[in-house]
Amino acid sequence: MDVDQEDVMILLPPLFSLKDMPENLALRPPPTLSSKTKQDEVVQQDWKMDMEPVLAIDFNIKEIPKRVNWEGYVPQGSDQWEWQMLLSNLFDERPIWPKESLTERLLDKGLTFTVEMFRRLLSRIAYYFSSGPFLRFWIRKGYDPRKDPDSRIYQRIDFRVPQPLRSYCDANAAKGLKHRWEEICAFQVFPYKFQTSLQFFELADDYIQQEIRKPLMQTTCTFGTGWFSYHMLNCLRQRLMVRFLSIFPKPGAENLLRAASERFEKLKKECNKSALKPGEVQQQTNAESTRNEDEEPNNVEEEEEDEVDNAEEELDQYEALDLAEEDSEIYLQAQAYLNVENISATHLQEIFDSFPSTEAGGDNTHDANVSDEEYEIYEPDSDDGYSDDNDS
C-alpha cells in the first residue's frame, strides 16, 4: 500500500484493547493542591534558594553567614516551628554553643532529634568554623566572634587524657558509658574520651572564670590562640589538667597530678609577670635577682625545657588522636618542622658520604646540593626516592 507514513494509523489489536468500540474521553482537570501542601512546597523551594554554606567554614573567611528570617519559611504552629523557636532562644541566651551542651539542654526538655533533623534546625540559625579557637562550636548567624573581644569566654579548650590513664577510658568506653555534659564541666566526673573539647564559659572553676574575664592584652583574634596569648592559654590548659587529674577515680594519677600542679604554678607566675606594668616587672626582676642570682638562669632553662617537652608530648597525642585542629597548631607545627630539618640533614649527609666520587670536585658538588635541597626533603627514610631524583 503506497501511502505516506504520516497517514498510517497504528491501532492496537482488539485483543489487547480494553474497549471494543471507540469512545470519547472527557479528561478531568488536575486536582488542586491543598493550601497546606502548597505552603510546604513553597517553603521547601524558597529554603533551598536562600540557604548558604554554614558547615565547616574556613576561619579566615571574610564574611560570615548572615542571619536568616526562618519564620518566613517554617510553617507556624508546626513541630519544626516549636523546635526552631526553642533553639533560637538558646542562641539568644548566648551566641556560641558546643553541640554536646545543646544536646543536653534539649534532652532535659524531653526533645530528641535525628542527626539530620538536628543539623537542619541548627543550620537555619547557626554556623561553625572548621578550624581556629571556636572549632566546631555552633555560632549564631550574623555574629562574628573574631570581631568581638567578649567572645573570648566562649572559646574552646581541649583536655587530653595522659597516656598512662587511657586504659581507664578504654574500659568504660567499651561498656558504652557516658557522663552528663554538665557533670564534666563541673569537674564532678573524669571524661571517658581521650580528648574532650570544652568551652571556657561552662567550666566551673573560679581561677579560669576570673582569668578569661580580665582585660585583654591583645587586640586581635588569632587563628592559634584566639583572644588569649599563648602563655595564658597554656596556663588555662594546665589548670584544666590539674582539675581533672584531682578527680581521677582510681590510683595511678598521683605523680601526674603533682607534676601538673607544679607546672601550673610556674605558668601562673609567668602570666602574672606578663600582666604587670613594665616598671613593676623590672622591680620584681631586680628583687628576685637580689635574693638569688644563681637560681635565676637555672629556672629559666628548666622552664624552657618543660615547654619543649610539653609541646612534643602534645604533638604526639595530637597525631595519635587524628584531631581536626588544635589551639596551639602554629607553635606545634613550628617545632615539628625543626625536627624534620635536623633529621633530614643527618640522613642526607650519610647518603652523600656513601656515593663514590667519579670526578674532581665531586664532593663539593654534593655539598652544594645538601645546602640547596635539604629543606625540600620531607621523607628522609625513603632512600630510593632520593636516588631517583639524582639520576634524572
Image (cartoon, grey):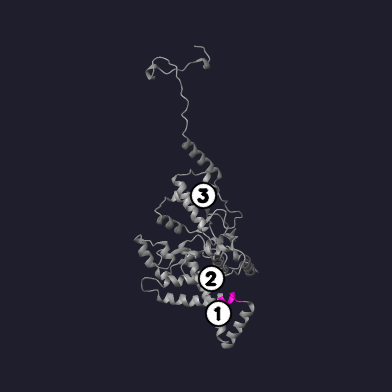
View extreme (right): residue: 361
Where is residue 22? Give x, y as percent. 42, 15
Secondary structure mostly seen in the magenta stretch: helix
Label 1 secondary element: helix
Q: Which span of residues is magenta-colored? A: 272-276
Return the mark for residue 211.
2
Position of 74 relative to 368 (above/below): above
Real-space Cα distance between discs 3 and 1? 52 Å
Callout 3–callout 1 Cβ contact below 8 Å: no
Q: Residue at x 55, y 71 (%)?
A: 232
Q: CA distance from mark 3 to mark 2?
A: 34 Å
Instruction: Give x and y (percent) for residue 321.
Output: 46, 63
Q: Nearer the viewer, residue 195 or 261?
A: 261
The answer to which of 259 and 226 lies nearer the viewer is 226
Q: Which residue is mark 1?
A: 301
The relative height of residue 372 versus residue 52 in the rendered view (above or below) is: below
Q: Earlier in the sequence, mark 3 or mark 1?
A: 3
Residue 343 falls in which quadrant of the image?
bottom right
Give the distance between the C-alpha atoms of the residues marked 2 and 1, in whole angstroms.
27 Å
Residue indicated by mark 3? 124
Label 2 packing within 10 angstroms: few (<14), some (14-19), many (20+): few
Q: Residue at x 51, y 39 (%)?
A: 42
Q: Position of residue 363 (x, y in %)?
A: 62, 69
How many numbered tags mark residues here?
A: 3
Query: Which numbered tag is attached to residue 48?
Result: none
Query: Which quadrant is home to the C terminus?
Result: bottom right
| Residue farthest toward the front in the current orientation of the protein | 77
Q: Secondary structure at mark 3?
A: helix
User: Which image quadrant for residue 170?
Assistant: bottom left
Q: Is residue 37 magenta?
A: no
Q: Nearer the viewer, mark 3 or mark 1?
A: 3
